Structure formats: C-alpha cells, structure tokens
Image (cartoon, helix red, strand yellow):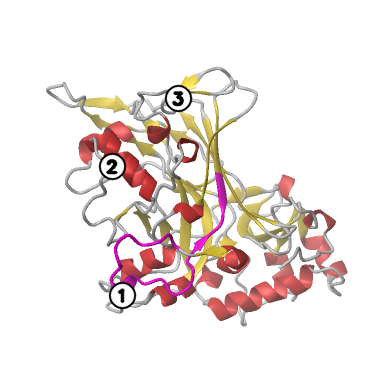
C-alpha cells in the first residue's frame, strides 16, 4: 500500500511519522483545552471531542472522545475499530467534502501537551528477547544457556500499572536494598545500576472472560495497538531481590510509554512471523497469523549539558521470539481474565550484534566495558540528568509509520 494522500499537506511526505496511513490515538491538552482524545495527522492533531460534538465522528449514541482516555473505544472490538478508522480516513483524505467543517478542530502538535493515552488496567512484562535472555545468562550465570522453560513458555511476571507513565515524565532514581557480593549485610540507598529496557508494549482492547482460554488468533484480534515501552530497571536492587519470585522493586518504580497508540490496523502491512522454533511449541501457542512487526527501534542517550544525544542501540521488534498474541494467549490460558487496558511488555529486545543490545547492562557488559558517548563522557549505567529516548518506525512504500518518542530524564533520588 502506498502513501495515502491527505488534505493536510504535512502528512504527505515520505518521512512524516503521522501520515494518513498511521492515524495514531493520543490524549492531549492545550492551554485552553482539557485533556481529550486526539488523532495525529501530519503536524496537527484532530480534536476528536470537538469533531464528535459537531456530528462528524460518532460511535453509537454516546459521546466518548471528550475523555482523557481511549478505553471506551478500545473495549468495543475490531469491527468498531475498523469502522472508526475508515471514518477518520474518509474525513482526512484528499478531496474530503468535510475539510472546511473539520479545519477548526485541528490543533498544532507543537501546542499540545501529551498525556497517558489509556487507563492501564494491569501491566505484565515478558522476557521474550532471546539474545537478551542469553546475554543475561552469560552476565549473571556465566552461561548463555537459556532457562529450561524458555523455549516452551513466554516467561513473564505481573508488574505495576500504577507507575506506567507517558513520555516526558521525569523519573527519580529509585531507593532500595542492595547487597554487594562480598558484603555481610545489605545496604539501603539510591541504585547505582540504573538501566533501561527497550521493549514494545501491546495494549489489550477487547476483554476475555475468567475461566475461558483464548486462542492465539483470538488474542491477536483482541490487541488494540502498540506503543514503545521503556521498562526502567535498577539492576543492583533486582540482583538482590529476584530469587526466587522474580523482579519486584527493581522494576516497580517506573515504566515509560510513547504517547501515541499505533493501531494494529496501521501496522498490518508490516507483519512478520516469529523466528524459527528450536523446539516445537505446544499447540495452544501455535502462531496462526504472523504476529510480529518489522519496526526499526533506536535508543539515544543525552547527558545533562550535552548538546546532542548519542545513539546507543538500533534493533528491530522482529527479533522477539514470542509475539504479543502468543503472550496474551498464554496469559489467559489458565483462565486469567484479560481486561481492556492491560499492557503487555514484550521483554527487552536485543539483536545478535552488540550494536543491537536493548539494555545498558548488555551494552556495558555489566559495567566491565563502559561505552563512550559523543560528548566524550563514558557510561555503564544511567547518571542523574541523563535523558533516554526510544524511537520506533515502520518503513512503508513511500511512507513511515512513526511511534512518537518515548523520553525520560532521570532525576536524583528523593531525600528520605
Ligand atoms: Ca522488562
């Protein structure tokens, strides 16, 4: 599919992140408008609340877009999502008869403050990056052998929804308990090994019922869209606490997501299959539709005072071993109900080359090999004042599906 032309001319270039092919959903406010649902197009946002009030956009009889979340549309399911997207496409396409009526409801992106685009019901984080799992094994246990279950189960843990924040939200360096290998007693204080994890987040739209398993295909149909996700991690806190029940405080202090939900429909041209299986999966995990996406990913790091950011890693979402649909089907197969607004982290995405590692722990090999930024500073982990930015885009035939940056700056630990 080529670039679809819009009457908003800034949407019609090959490198615009928000062409008519994209139509990502966000929540924005301005100095005069309260937070509400909006759709990015070119360098503008369509104010869906005003368009709905004017009778140009509607879903059923009730008004749903004058709200600070997209959850009401998310819960309605794929046919409604498709109808809404088709309506938006018609309104914004070149030669739309509604151009004059819609024009007053376009707000410059530059004037908008972005907010969380949906209410996170629960947050589950997986561990589906194979290279990451092998690197972690090498760093922590001295062996790249995967855990015995890894090739059979999409491993995950239940994280915290309360600390999922939108891009641009600063994160305080977390406090916690750590223990040096040669120390007799643990100590308390700010983490010394603050890290990122480059992930994709999948957002559940339609819910499932308690006690009712779902197939991988049903799971795929339930996914509303995707965001970039930075699963901030305190490696020293994690290292002391994680056995036997897995990550806890080392992950609970913050998770950042990009501000625009990129719909599964917008990403449809970029579907790719999961990698070849080393071990045959149990049938309930069989992939029915290619469940990954060809999305280029990048992370940059910028120290406070540096005049530009340095790219520290570049990889691709298609590196992941299990798709979000497989993870969601696995999550529900025991009878666990999945809800509108559930957020699934893919797991850290690392490719086979060093330039593709998705965490600083891997890039610096646990601090043994610090790397140098363009400013001349070296890093093994994050220093106070550093800004980390995740970027993602899918490259189409003459168009780009952009995600919008996922940015976070680290502030010093709070006084306690
Ligand atoms: Ca993670």
Distance, label 2 to label 1, CA atoms, is 27 Å
Which residue has dot 3 on it? 383
Residue 106: image tag: none
Q: Are dots 3 and 1 in contact, CB under 8 Å? A: no
Query: From what the image shows, is residue 77 above or below residue 270?
Result: below
Other-residue count near label 1 (Cα within 10 Å), few / some / many at <14 / 14–19 / ≥20:
few
Distance, label 3 to label 1, CA atoms, is 46 Å
Which residue has dot 2 on it? 144
Residue 54 appears in view = no
Which region shows up in magenta?
Answer: 274-297
Q: Residue at x 38, y 67 (%)?
A: 326
Q: Are dots 2 and 3 in contact, CB under 8 Å? A: no
Residue 309 horizontal/vertical position (percent)? 60, 29
Secondary structure beneath disc 3?
loop
Other-residue count near label 2 (Cα within 10 Å), few / some / many at <14 / 14–19 / ≥20:
some
* Front tag of 2 and 3: 2
> Disc 2 or 1, which lies upstream in sequence?
2
Which residue has dot 1 on it? 283
- Which of the pair 11/356 is nearer the observer? 356
290 magenta-colored: yes
Q: Residue at x 81, y 65 (%)?
A: 5
């Amino acid at each position: 599919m080529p670039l679809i032309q819009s009457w908003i001319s800034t949407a019609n270039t090959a490198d615009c992140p928000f062409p008519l092919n994209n139509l990502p959903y966000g929540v924005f406010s301005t100095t005069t408008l309260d937070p509400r649902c909006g759709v990015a197009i070119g360098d503008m946002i369509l104010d869906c609340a005003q368009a709905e009030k004017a009778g140009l956009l509607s879903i059923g009889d009730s008004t749903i877009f004058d709200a600070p979340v997209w959850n009401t549309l998310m819960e309605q399911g794929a046919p409604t999502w498709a109808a809404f997207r088709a309506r938006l496409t018609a309104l914004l396409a070149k030669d739309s008869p509604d151009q004059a009526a819609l024009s007053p409801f376009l707000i410059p992106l530059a004037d908008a403050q972005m907010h969380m685009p949906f209410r996170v019901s629960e947050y589950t984080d997986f561990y589906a990056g194979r290279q990451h799992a092998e690197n972690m094994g090498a760093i922590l246990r001295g062996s790249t052998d995967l855990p015995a279950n890894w090739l059979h189960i999409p491993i995950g843990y239940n994280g915290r929804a309360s600390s999922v924040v939108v891009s641009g939200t600063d994160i305080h360096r977390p406090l916690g308990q750590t223990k040096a290998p040669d120390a007799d007693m643990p100590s308390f204080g700010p983490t010394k090994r603050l890290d990122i994890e480059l992930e994709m987040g999948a957002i559940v739209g339609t819910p499932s019922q308690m006690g009712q398993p779902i197939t991988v295909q049903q799971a795929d149909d339930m996914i509303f869209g995707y965001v970039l996700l930075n699963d901030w991690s305190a490696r020293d806190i994690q290292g002391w606490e994680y056995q036997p029940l897995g990550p806890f405080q080392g992950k609970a202090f913050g998770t950042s997501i990009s501000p625009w939900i990129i719909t599964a429909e917008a990403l449809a041209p970029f579907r790719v299959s999961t990698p070849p299986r080393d071990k045959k999966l149990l049938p309930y995990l069989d992939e029915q539709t290619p469940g990954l996406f060809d999305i280029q990913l990048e992370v940059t790091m910028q120290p406070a005072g540096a005049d530009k950011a340095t790219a520290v890693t570049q990889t691709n979402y298609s590196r992941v071993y299990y798709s979000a649909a497989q993870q969601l089907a696995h999550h529900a197969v025991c009878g666990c109900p999945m809800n509108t607004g559930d957020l699934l982290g893919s797991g850290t995405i690392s490719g086979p080359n060093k330039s593709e590692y998705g965490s600083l722990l891997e890039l610096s090999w646990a601090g043994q090999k610090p790397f140098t930024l363009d400013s001349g500073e070296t890093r093994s982990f994050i220093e106070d004042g550093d800004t980390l930015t995740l970027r993602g885009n899918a490259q189409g035939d003459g168009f780009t599906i952009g995600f919008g940056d996922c940015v976070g700056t680290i502030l010093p630990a709070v006084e306690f």
